[in-house]
Image: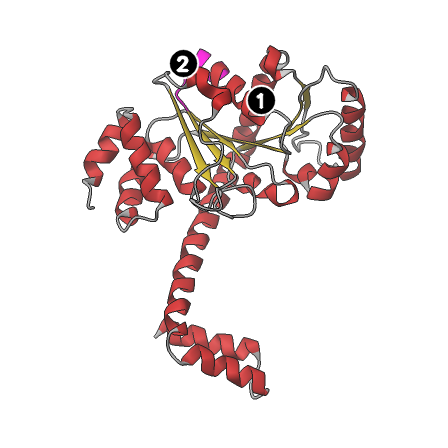
Amino acid sequence: MTVDVGDLVTRARAGEPRAVARLISMVENASPQLREVMAALAPHAGHANVIGLTGSPGVGKSTTTSVLVAAYRGQDKRVGVLAVDPSSPFTGGALLGDRVRMQEHATDPGVYIRSMGSRGHLGGLSWATPQAVRVLDAAGCDVVIVETVGVGQAEVEIASLADSTVVLLAPGMGDGIQAAKAGILEIADVYVVNKADRDGADHTIRDLRNMMALVEGSDPHAWKPPIIKTIASQGEGNEELVAALAKHHDWMAGAGELDRRRTARIADEIEAIAVTALREQIGDLRGGSLLDDLAGQVLAGSTDPYAAADQLLAAIAT
């Protein structure tokens, strides 16, 4: 069904939750009007501070997200939350869609919370997440928090989407070693050791510091991720976390890193859209004989995969 995109965007910018929900649904469902939606949103986006939260299941991501929402609302900022959950294998919907840990914010008109199913997409994010972030940004959110699926070593994709990436760990879960294996050390802007009242919290922090010392560069002006101890469920350490994020944002703005990250993020998004369009065209060719003919030539040894790919691209270009 065709919708009035201009009216929908106007209502979303006025803070109407239903309009925001409709726009994100159009993104998730790859609506035929998606290009029109993105064109209407473009002049209004690019202002929100995007914060990514990642970590293994059970470390307290949802509780920490709720804490951050409360902190930013206390600063009178509008907050959007995208909680990317595991998908139902039957419906493709988010399994944890009720967001029970964030119900205290559900009736706040200054907060918009949306669960999105990952739909089998690796990297901890849904394929539609970057454009959903743009919807919340254009709708007037000052801060957009993206909480990712806890999928371990495939979750580093959040670093390419967020301005600041928070990596949560908890004592007694083997996260110190896991962080090194998963490349988490390279993506974190702020570390949070949550549930710090548990035995082993100091040991986790010590492991982190030792591993960080191994990968630190020699640039004295480079950002050095702080390690924040929190007990999110009790409100301990939350002010330090918000302060660390503000300090990181100020550092990025002063060092030119903020513009660099946002430019790289948009470049990745453009590339993903172009690659998707290219795959669709290749899929159309699969219905004909060219792709099968090229595959047969490679199988027979009369050509190689690179030469065949060149011929395929040439066919698409024409």
Give amino acid for label 2: Asp
Residue 238, horizontal then vertical, whole percent? 59, 15
The quarter of the rendered structure image containing the C terminus is: bottom left
Any mark on residue 206, and which?
Answer: none
Residue 24, compared with residue 248, is above or below; it is below
Q: Mark 1 near mark 2, Cβ–Cβ under 8 Å?
A: no
Is 153 or 188 nearer to us in this picture?
A: 153
- Residue at 65% in and 15% down: 231
Q: How crowded is mark 2: few (under 14 residues within 10 Å), some or many (20 or more)?
A: few
Instruction: Using residue 91 as the reference point, say whether residue 255 is left or right of it.
Output: right
- Reading the image, the residue beneath label 1 is 247
Residue 265 seen in the current view: yes
Residue 280, horizontal then vertical, whole percent? 39, 63
Lower sequence index among marks 1 and 2: 2
Q: How crowded is mark 1: few (under 14 residues within 10 Å), some or many (20 or more)?
A: few
Range shown magenta: 71-79
The image quarter containing residue 38 is top left
- Reading the image, the residue beneath label 2 is 76
Give amino acid for label 1: Lys
Residue 217 seen in the current view: no
